[in-house]
Image (cartoon, grey):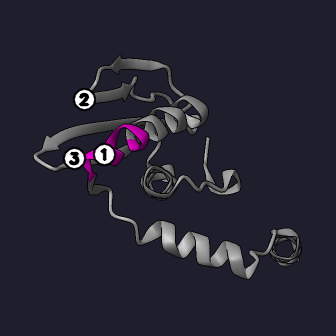
Amino acid sequence: MKVKISAIILSILFLSFCISAPKMTPQEEAYINDVLNTPLTFTVAKDDSEETWGRIQSFVGKYSSMKLQTATDFVLQTYNPTGSVPRYGYTATKTPMGDEVEFQVDCTYCNMFTRKEAIQNAHILAYYALTGEVNPRFVHK
């Protein structure tokens, strides 16, 4: 009897979570689809590189859980997250390549259970760097 009651309580909690979980609008679904299809290594025209680098710096300043460790003209890196509390850090590099500049971004994490969120954060950063568009609802802090 005790097992059945526990199963019923768990089922009720699961259903209430599913019902209360916010649904995505079609625009949000399109946004997250575009975000997840954005590569973490990308190039932009040299003329657009300063704006792109500025967006990367702004994003890291706003959304990183960690303090900056290195900030140069070509490398931006936060301290690595540690512990079991979900926290996210970032690494970004900028490499001149003639008429283009290559950027590479990554989101670091400290808890193996937050890997998926860190990957999403990295793609959101790349998408923001390229487009200037970010939906803070999807950024995990």
SS of the residue under disc 1: helix
Viewer-nearest residue: 55 or 35: 55
Badge 3: residue crowd in 10 Å (few <14, some 14–19, many ≥20): many
> Residue at label 2?
74
Report if residue 84 is visible in the image.
no
| Residue beneath the point at 37% across and 17% down | 69
* Marked residue nearer the N-terminal end (1 or 2): 1
> Residue at label 1?
47
49 in magenta:
yes
Viewer-nearest residue: 12 or 41: 41
Mark sitting on residue 101: 3
- Residue extent of the magenta highlight: 45-52
| Residue beneath the point at 61% across and 47% down | 140
Quarter occupied by residue 61:
top right
The CA span between labels 1 and 3 is: 9 Å
Q: Amino acid at mark 2?
A: Phe
SS of the residue under disc 3: strand
Is mark 1 in CB contact (under 8 Å) with mark 3? Answer: no
